[in-house]
Amino acid sequence: MSTIGALLFPALILTLPMAAQDQRLVQAEQLYSRRPDLSPVRQAIALLTQLAQTDPNNYEAQWHLAKYYYFLGKHVQL
């Protein structure tokens, strides 16, 4: 039983940063759902920018970031 624990523990440790990243993505989606107001969209962009800097290969973060920037660009008043 201790061998199994020794094998699973590193896998658990490796998934912890992913869980934090997933939480930022979920939080950004919640903020974006309030998008008639642009302030939450800007907050979502800030979260996703942090996530993208932490993990540049995170497709979900990059895709959502592009979508949120597009929305902001279409709705900002100049």
Image (tube, grey):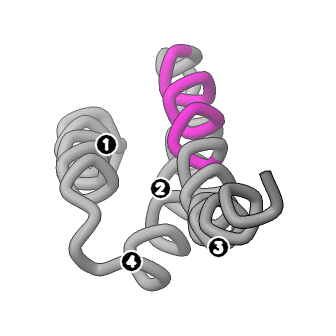
The span picked out in magenta is: 24-33
Q: CA distance from mark 2 to mark 3?
A: 32 Å
Q: Can residue 29 be found in the magenta stretch?
A: yes
> Could you tell me residue 24's position as x and y percent?
62, 49
In the rendering, which numbered label is found on residue 10?
3
Secondary element type, mark 3: helix
For the point 33% across and 54% down, which residue is it? 61
For the point 65% across and 42% down, which residue is it? 23
**Does the residue at mark 1 contact the one at mark 3 (Cβ under 8 Å)?**
no
Of labels 2 and 3, earlier in sequence is 3
Q: CA distance from mark 1 to mark 4?
A: 18 Å
Query: Which quarter of the picture shows residue 10?
Result: bottom right
- Amino acid type for the residue under numbered disc 1: Tyr
Instruction: Report the front residue among 68 and 8.
Output: 8
> Could you tell me residue 3's position as x and y percent?
70, 65
Q: Can residue 68 be found in the magenta stretch?
A: no
Label 4: which residue? 55
Query: Which quarter of the picture shows residue 11?
Result: bottom right
Instruction: Report the front residue among 25 and 6.
Output: 6
* Foreground disc of the pair 1, 4: 4
- Amino acid type for the residue under numbered disc 3: Pro
In the rendering, which numbered label is found on residue 45?
2
